[in-house]
Image (tube, rainbow, N blue to C red):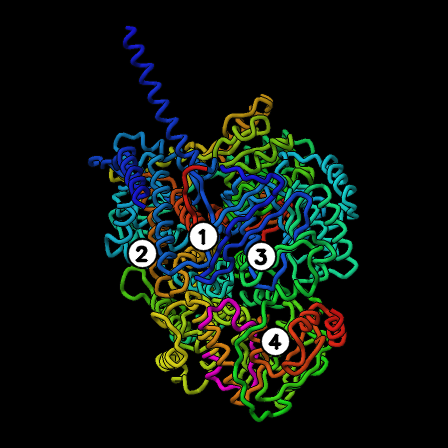
Amino acid sequence: MLKIKTLIVGLLKKIAHFFHNIYCYFKSLRIKLEQKERVSKREELIITLSAIGIAFVLSGIFIALNGVNPFVALWKVIVSALGSPYGISETLVKAIPLIFTGLAVAIALNSKLWNIGAEGQLFFGATLATAFIIYGPVLPKPLEITVLIALGAIGGALWAGIPAILKIKFKMNEVISTLLLNYVAINIADYFLFGPWKGKDNFPYTPEFPPEAKFSRIGFGRVHAGLILALVLVVLLYILIYHTKTGYKLRMTGSSLKAAKYAGINIKKMMFMVFLLSGALAGLAGVSQICGIEYKLHQHISTGYGYTGIIVAWLARTNPFIIVIFAIFLSILLKGADSLQIAMRLPASVGVVMQALILFAILGSELFKNYNVKLIRGK
Amino acid sequence: MSEIKNNSNLVLMKNISKSFYGNKVNTDVEFTLEKGEIHALLGENGAGKTTLMNMLTGVYFPDDGEIYFKGKKLNFKFPGNALQIGIGMVHQRFSLVGNLTVLENLILGHPDNKFVINIPEKKKLIKTYMDQFNFQIDMDAIVGELPIGVRQKVEILKMLVREVDVLIVDEPTTVLTKQEADNLMEILKSIAKTGKGIIFITHKMSEVFQIADKITVLRKGLKIATVDKNDTNPRKLAKMMVGKESEITFERPKVETKPGVVKIQNLFVNSDKGILAVNDLSFELAGGEIIGIAGVSGNGQVELADALTGNRDVIRGKILFKDDDITNDTPVKRIDKGVSYVPGDRIHVGVAGNQSVWENIIMKVYRLPRFKQGILLNNKKLKEYAEKIIKKYNIFLPSINLPALLLSGGNLQKLIIGREMERDCDLYVFVYPTRGLDVGATEFVRNAILQLRNQGKAVILISGDFDEIFGLSDRIAVMYEGNFTGIFDNGVHSLEEIGLMMSGCSEEQAVKEMSNA
Amino acid sequence: MKKLFWIFVTIAAVMLIAGCGGSTAKGEKLKAGFVYVGPVEDAGWTKSHDDGRLAMEELDFVGESVFVESVPEGADAVRVITELAESGCDIIFTTSFGYMDPTLEVALQYPDKTFLHATGYKTAENYTNYMGKMYQSKYLAGIVAGNMTKSGKLGYVAPFPIPEVVRLINAYTLGAQSVNPDATVQVLWTNSWFDPVHEKEAANTMIADGCDIITQGTDSAGPQEAAQAAGVYSIGYDSDMSMFAPTAHLTAPVWHWGVYYKDVATKVHNGTWTNEPIWWDMGTGVTGLSPYNEVVPQEVRDQVAEVKVQILENDQIFTGPLYDNMGDLRVEDGVALTDGEKLSIQWFVKGVKGKIPNAK
């Protein structure tokens, strides 16, 4: 009896000692931070991918806490998004607005400008295009679509022009102005939806658009011509950024304001242009949604695509082609969250949590881009 | 944890070295600070003063060497730790929150703050500090509405409230009037009397003698000397700051000059802080002539260069270039008219550091019709152009796609100068063109400048290096507080006389002082 | 780097062990899918449907049921409904008006499955709409409110100015006026089905304005909490909300969707289901009042019980004379509104203080 007791006490002591050692090890660890002067493209990519990896691991833990095997969940997400032609087509459908808003935020970010207002620009572009459908003549389809695309772009650009002027003339921070204008744009759309444009059944949506105003489908599920427009824009933007004078100026302005000014570039003009371009792209997301898939204007034409676009842009940074990849990546996640509800009985919040974790991990990884972080032992 | 012998040393920095991108900013620097001492850190901009202090406050870690504080070796975890252990620095840019009150700024982030803050008690506490050091500040005033001199006092008070033992002030008087500056000095002296150590970073000679007990002079990242105030005089210090006269002479063949390429008439320009930096300046410059502008940095040289090249607005006055009034032309117009600028801040202004080498070489020519291909840029031709310049000017690099900031200082300057020379302009403005460069690169730059002169270009050379000024200039101007204290042919005045002019003496005074000595 | 790798591997292994396997499919039993507009914890509309779903699951020929919550009412809904159909659901319920067209779109592609849409009006071979006569229970709740109010001013937090909501506001008002002719009902729109913060604010505004009983047509418990905090009475909606307002909550007109869901499941199972639209009255039990707060006097309870019997015998809630709140006579004495008229009503009865924006 006594023997067992001493054995147990000894064992407990050993365990306590073990944990104490671990505690001491971590206690003796120190984090050292030093400002970094630069970070290479390769390092940046590694840091970004690691951040996504960490976000996945944390999401996995969250999913496991819900009593679901995270690997099975991940497999389900991938299968539902890419495992069938239908899944792929739906993934693309949801990626289309994200390509537009991703490009919109990215082009601003390239010039070190924060466009948090893609959501509002999306709504304003969509509202302006809808106004033409409701009040304007019905034109032959090619012409009608062209007009709608133009109006969407103009609407978005107009809406982005407000914070641009506020920033350039009055030095108002664009993060705040673009963000707040989102609510204004959405309320303007609401005004029309609850007012002059509301449906016959008194619900807040417009009548279905005439066939002339609908984007054609490309023959692959619900994927519509908005995808082609988006991909064409990706190529055009690539050419604009890397093969034109304007693009050269954009790159220089984004890289260093002082150097750009020294090179004779009119920085204010460039900023204004970037804002308009960014807004126009977000406005196109709106047109693509209403003419490509929803066929009417209502309150839910965007499920936060303007905000998700920020994550897409932050992940992809400079290259328009990489935007497409990350737009599809986030589309898979967003869609996957719904599939997980059906297949694994996970709550809807899983998707939101995953998105938030990725964003936090990416923002957190900024630390590693700006500082050398060293883990050292001892004092 | 090693103890050191002398315990009255508040700070001991031993054999400190630090380099960025292979450029040595501090080499083997020693520095000590004792209790109750005001220690001036004197040196040109770029001499390594701020970097040295950034290591003391933990923003950077030294590559080599050790720092002791109150006898203990420093080991920072995060920038900002310094304040917790008692080292506070008042930067040139204040860290106050503009729309909070003075009181709120003083207690913001204070380590003693509990969840609930007892405001009246804090007020009483702060009042004791204010009385002790003779501050007169309204604690309920909004900081953003206070004049800049008072804001600075709030900064200092903030450090006192945090009970720092070492107070570092970085060029505190640049934004102050004479009266405010005097008042500040008195306050600093009374703080030192309580046993705190003060490090006073400056490049103004007069202040050094007004306030410091000891003076350490840094030049090009090296400690030149630490001297007691009573053992030195402005002349000696000036010489330490600027270095010895050089033995090397450059050949300056006689060339035919074209008078009046540049005419500057009654020019007024503001600094970034909104105070007058160039004050009623007039001079002329001929083609085939180098005018060397000497002066302690911060006396308006950079602002003058910026204004000439369109990077800064002119308040009043005229700039005539080849009898064309370019005062209000945009930078791009001046580039097209033949004004070239080699800026002092190579890495942030001279190039866009994250962009590739070739993109930086084409910075001023990409708009030319010969590089167009329809509406697109002919990137192939542009790259060929960049390759050509790289070859011609011996820029050493593995790939033209490398980001420019990865180049060494010398290669970067070659890139910039090659880019500018290739454009064939009529006016070249150089600002600190050889600062931080090794011997080889320095020689390249100086030869390039001479070559331009010999080709009949007008050259303005702003420099803190007297080898350079004496070696290259046809005429020398000494700039002090926005104007020239003297402008004369190279060889008329000695280095000592120029040193005196740099600290505000007029030409005649300087000559008189030297003949008295 | 190597250490980090092993940490990842360890975490991955732990997750593999900790997580349990996926669910296994059951045999020949019915599988049902539900599309919800809000989260199941909304304590209101979505919760009432989820309670109904759980009640239906008790039937032994119903194998399992799945739901997808917080589904946007647009193109995303089409995908979610399709995925439900693809995952083997035999019956699919979509529970918000905005799903009407998306559900129809999917229903046409899966003719051998049954689709049911709450609150809409469209039908197809395998698709119909269902609703209950909630206005009857709202009328009864109005009687409780009319008895319990001191100021005679009632507050109503309302979502959208659509006929469904307008009809319920009118019934509640008429119920209150049947015992308290001077009672008025203040309406504030939130333009959202589920927005706890906004709803709470609206309730507080009306309480400050002198309303002493708060009720709602929205889905969150926000207004209830506001009433509880302000010390006034409240009447819930959708499901029993007394847990959010223990002393304020008098009663709530509630949905008992389980009654209907069991019926549909049985009929589909037996092959007797038809696409006839459903608008069940209170007698079926699909709507009713939740248990009373102890402060509601017995006479009031008796009165409500009496009126309930009358309504089940002969529903005269929307029988003239009825004036609108502009003072115009809308329904002549003795004339009753038809079901069609009730379903498209776009005017407020006398005593409602509020406006229907751009009424057509």
Q: Which residue is mark 4?
A: B305
The N terminus of chain A sits in image quarter: top left
Q: Which residue is mark 3?
A: B50
**Which amino acid type is marked by label 2?**
Glu
Marks 4 and 3 share the same chain: yes
- Chain on which label 3 sits: B
In the picture as drawn, the residue positioned furthest to the top comes out as A1
Residue B468's spot in the image, x, y percent? 56, 75
Residue C41's spot in the image, x, y percent? 45, 36
Q: Which residue is mark 2?
A: A90
Mark 1: few/some/many CA within 10 Å (<14, 14-19, 20+): some
**Which amino acid type is marked by label 3?**
Thr
| Secondary structure found at label 1 | helix
Marks 4 and 2 share the same chain: no
Please report the residue visible at 66 percent of the width from the left and 43 percent of the height from the top: B35
**Which amino acid type is marked by label 1?**
Glu
- Residue A108 colored in magenta in the image: no
When asked about the image quadrant of residue A191, the answer is bottom right
Real-space CA distance between mark 4 and mark 2, rounded to the nearest whole angstrom: 59 Å
Real-space CA distance between mark 1 and mark 3, rounded to the nearest whole angstrom: 26 Å
Real-space CA distance between mark 1 and mark 4, rounded to the nearest whole angstrom: 36 Å
Real-space CA distance between mark 4 and mark 3, rounded to the nearest whole angstrom: 24 Å
Please report the residue visible at 71 percent of the width from the left and 83 percent of the height from the top: B265
Numbered disc in front, either 1 or 4: 4
Residue C138's spot in the image, x, y percent? 53, 36
Mark 3: few/some/many CA within 10 Å (<14, 14-19, 20+): some
- Chain on which label 1 sits: A
- Residue B435 colored in magenta in the image: yes
Numbered disc in front, either 4 or 2: 4
Numbered disc in front, either 3 or 2: 3
